[in-house]
Image (spheres, rainbow, N blue to C red):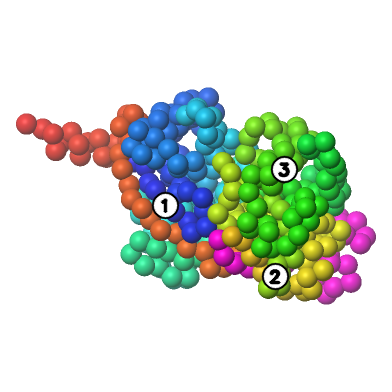
Amino acid sequence: MIGHLAHAAGAPCPTFVLDAARLPHEETALLGHLTEARRYLTSAGGAHVLKIALVEPSAHPMFDLDYRFVQALPGAPDRFDLRGSCGHSALASVVAAARSGMLPRLVPGTRVRIRVRNNGDSVVCEVDRAERDEVGFTVTFVQPRPVPFAELLPTGRTRTLLEADGRRVEVSMVASANTYAFVDARSLQVPDETALFAAGGDLLRSLESLRAAAAELLGWPPGGAFPKIAAVLPGAGGGIAARALTVPGWHPSLALTGAVCLGTAARIPGTVPWRITREADAGDGPLAITTPGGRTAVTAVVSLPGTAAVPPPGAADGDGALLWSSVAGKHVTFQGSFALAPLSHLQFEEVAQCLALSGAG
């Protein structure tokens, strides 16, 4: 079997992309194969690669690729979390799929439609530029129907109190692209953007404790990767500043799904990000997000009461709804392909025939 490595800028590590059609769909058998692949990758110096993407041509007529994300967890090669998604890995999958022949060659204007099997998301990846080993994208998370804000709040509330380390802290839990808990960094004694980006182990431990409490509230394993968490406050140059956790430790920037979720949360009245964007006078256009790794912008398009937008069917009076979210300026570097020796029995039949012929005599 052939594995591919591609790194989306801003991601904490490259993504290890595999052909899902060559792997079992049953979870126990699948994770057994992924454990072997991970051991092999580690032996080759790839222990830092903790993102795995499984892709195959979609059988659904509306999509080009089916994509499933697997988060590898530190500690042992058989530890995984399949609960959430990863936008950076979805982009890496598009580049790897084109390199392997699963998709046509990527050229500017190409649109690749992805069905995310983890959570049912529909993602459109539009190629802005294509070079030899790097591809630039605009990514749009499309809703098949307007999603009422109430459906984006896992706890049913815009703000929830979590208890961690003996204190109660207010967070907003929002589920859009991934489930996140957003906390005002100032409630954790972090006063501004400079202090947020310079913070060390104390803030890291506080956020890890809050994330575990959020997971327990949702009935998810507290030692997994989901839900995600990010501390936010008004940005020094406008917009919002954010610092997030990943597996393990600090995220170098902010996950693509994190940007989408934060942009969505900022449009839901009453949430922590909504209050911060109003404080920062960020307006209702694209939301500028500053992270330790740089700046990005996300557009979350919603329908709100009293606007010209068509209200969502079945939404309660006074409720808004999410229509779509988009992030531009993302790029992915293809890093190469290699044969996975422990999964050689899963290689393409055509490859096996070629290898047999080349070894004859």
Q: Which comes before the other along the chain, label 1 or label 3?
A: 1
Give the residue at x 48% y 59%: 9
> Does 351 lie within the magenta span?
no
Q: Position of residue 329 (x, y in %)?
A: 53, 68
Looking at the rendered image, the disc whose residue lies closer to the viewer, 2 or 1, is: 2
Residue position for label 2: 236
Q: Which comes before the other along the chain, label 2 or label 1?
A: 1
Lateral position of residue 108 relative to residue 322, left or right: left
Q: Which mark is residue 6?
A: 1
Q: Which mark is residue 347?
A: none
Q: In this orientation, which residue lies closer to the viewer: 358 or 177?
A: 177
Instruction: For marks 2 and 1, give the CA distance.
Output: 33 Å
Q: SS for tag 3?
A: helix
Q: Say few, some or many: other residues with alpha carbon within 10 Å of mark 2 (under 14 / 14 to 19 / 20 or more).
A: few
Instruction: For marks 2 and 3, give the CA distance.
Output: 23 Å
Give the residue at x 66% y 48%: 178
Residue position for label 3: 206
Q: Amino acid at mark 1?
A: Ala
Q: Amino acid at mark 2?
A: Ala
Query: Which range of residues does the magenta coloring cover?
Result: 293-322
Q: Say few, some or many: other residues with alpha carbon within 10 Å of mark 3 (under 14 / 14 to 19 / 20 or more).
A: some
Classify the position of the C terminus by image quarter. top left
Please say if 152 is above or below 239. above
Lateral position of residue 201 relative to residue 43, left or right: right
Q: SS for tag 2?
A: loop
Q: SS for tag 1?
A: strand
Give the residue at x 72% y 57%: 232
* Residue 129 seen in the figure: yes
Secondary structure, magenta segment, majority class: loop
Q: Amino acid at mark 3?
A: Ser
Q: In this orientation, which residue lies closer to the viewer: 181 or 6?
A: 181
